Amino acid sequence: MQRRNALKSIAAGAVLAGASGVFLSACDRGKPQFHSVDITGAEYAKDFKLTDFDGKPRTLADFKGKAVVLFFGFTQCPDVCPTTMTELAQVKKLLGADGDKVQGLFVSIDPERDTPAVLKEYMQNFDPSFLGLYAASPEALAALAKDFKIYYKKVDGKTPTSYSMDHTAASYVYDPQGRLRLYARYGMGPEALAEDIRLLLKTG
């Protein structure tokens, strides 16, 4: 009798464990699984006030309805910046018709050399819809970088104009409602980022 009761207890436990597993799986399925770092609800990098290469003031509200990918860099960057922009252009192609719902933004951390004309020419190398943005002053750029938790530092070169810039090599991704959602690491590849953005466009 005791053996029969013990078996019944084990069986009941297995059923409960199975039900719990199903419940957890259902919960997992309800939350989007991103390749990027999910930072939904972050209390920083919520907005910006910058100027684009055509002299137009810009904030996140200008891009409502689109997934925004924002990257801090400089036009004379030898590898990370052009690679990031090239991959973002590839992301738009991978998304097909939804590619028009992606807005690429490049924030210059090199105000000395990245004039509006230089920014415009640089961005058009990657995609005609991408915008280059700059801050009103070095102080405004420093404040913005602090708010966005972005690191950048000038590294002296052999001549006064041949310096380089160390900087954070990652992108922020906002959903179509303008909410910060993802931290996309450098080198994750266009396919992974395209999948993440497709999820954002689908789930909002």
Image: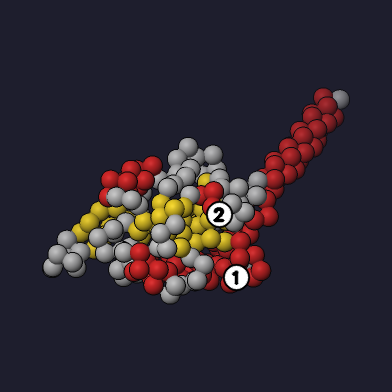
- Residue for point 22% across, 56% down: 154
Between 88 and 63, the residue placed more toward the observer is: 63
Image-based side of 120 in relation to 98, left or right: left
What residue would you read off at disc 2?
A: 63
User: Which scheme is used to colour this image of the protein?
Assistant: secondary structure
> Which quarter of the rendered picture does the N terminus lie within?
top right
Query: Residue beneath label 1, please?
Result: 94
Which residue type carries mark 2? Phe
Q: Position of residue 191 (x, y in %)?
A: 56, 67
> What's under tag 1, amino acid-wise?
Leu
- The tag on residue 85 is none
Q: Residues within 10 Å of mark 1 (few under 14, many from 20)?
A: some
Who is closer to the viewer here, 39 or 148?
148
Sequence-first disc among 2 and 1: 2
CA gap, disc 2 and disc 1: 21 Å
Residue 39 in the image: x percent, y percent?
Answer: 51, 44
Circle 1 — which element? helix
Is label 2 in a helix, a strand or a loop? helix
Between circles 2 and 1, the one closer to the viewer is 2
Near-viewer residue (108 or 165):
108
Residue 116 in sight here: yes
Task: Identify the residue at horizontal 20%, vertical 64% (top origin).
Answer: 163
Q: How many marks?
A: 2
